[in-house]
Amino acid sequence: MKGLLSSPQMICRELSAFETDDLNSVRQSFRDAASCTLRQAWLTKPETDFAPAIVRTGWRAGSLLVFVELTDADIFTRATKPHERLWELGDTFEIFLHPVEQRSYVEFHIAPNNLRLQLRFADAAKLTRKTGSLENSLIRDDVFSSRTWVRPEVGRWFVFAEIPVKSVSENPNLLPGSEWLFSFSRYDYTCGRKKPVISSTSPHTKPDFHCQAEWGTMRF
């Protein structure tokens, strides 16, 4: 119900090595990992076209590992190069991460064709994404890696992301013992529908993905 949902809490455990290019290997490794689902907490009930997604997290060798399975009836993007405004061009999965001891935070986007957008904000008050220009927040060098699998025959696409702690945190210490705020969200486009269906792991009272007061907490 709207207004009754609590922010998710995730305990990220260390995962064993696996083949990052093999979907079955990735799924097996994340089978018992911490998980949370995407929702539309600002609505009293989900939109008719809402499709579920589940995110699982873990860590290994100084990197946060994220694996997501997204149900999707129409998987597509018009994006053709990195650093485009992916959320305006088609299906997009978004990752928000904010170590609790610092002011800056990151926002990473991944499209079904594995194109990425990487942003860093100096603090929660600087929402340049809404002002039109991303230039001041854009990270042009690759700071994390990802892999996607598109399976339209079963109405799914999958994302695996490996995010080094140094890409997020100003503290060079390893992950164990750290605490980060987090949120995962998506833009789910369908041909013929004017607007995408958006959802988030955070219990937002309105669809403002940058509202960190409603983000979850991730502990390593």
Image (cartoon, rainbow, N blue to C red):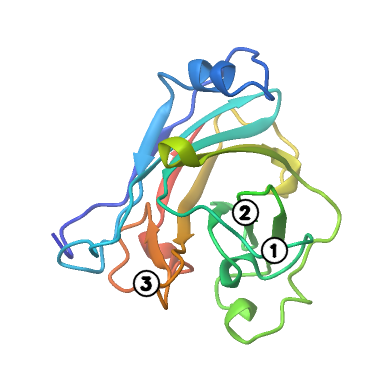
Which amino acid does the dot numbered 2 rest on?
Answer: Ala
Q: Which residue is depicted at the point 36% across and 61% down?
A: 214
Residue 79, disc: 1
Number of numbered callouts drawn: 3
Pick whichever of labels 1 and 3 is earlier in the sequence: 1
Quadrant position of the N terminus in the picture: bottom left
Query: Can you say whether 18 is above or below 21 in the image?
Result: above
Q: Which residue is depicted at the point 43% across and 19% down?
A: 31
Helix, strand or loop for disc 1? loop
Distance Cα–Cα, label 2 vs label 1 = 8 Å
Helix, strand or loop for disc 3? loop
Which amino acid does the dot numbered 1 rest on?
Answer: Ala
Using the rendered view, name the quadrant where residue 147 is placed: top right
Between label 1 and label 3, give the one nearer the viewer.
1
Using the rendered view, name the quadrant where residue 134 is placed: bottom right
Which amino acid does the dot numbered 3 rest on?
Answer: Pro
Residue 207, disc: 3
Pick whichever of labels 2 and 1 is earlier in the sequence: 1
Mark 3: few, some, or many residues within 10 Å (few <14, many ≥20)? some
Pick whichever of labels 2 and 3 is earlier in the sequence: 2
Q: Which residue is mark 2?
A: 111
Distance Cα–Cα, label 2 vs label 3 = 20 Å
Residue 69 at x, y percent in the picture: 45, 38
Between label 2 and label 3, give the one nearer the viewer.
2
Distance Cα–Cα, label 1 vs label 3 = 23 Å
Query: Can you say whether 29 is above or below 92 in the image?
Result: above
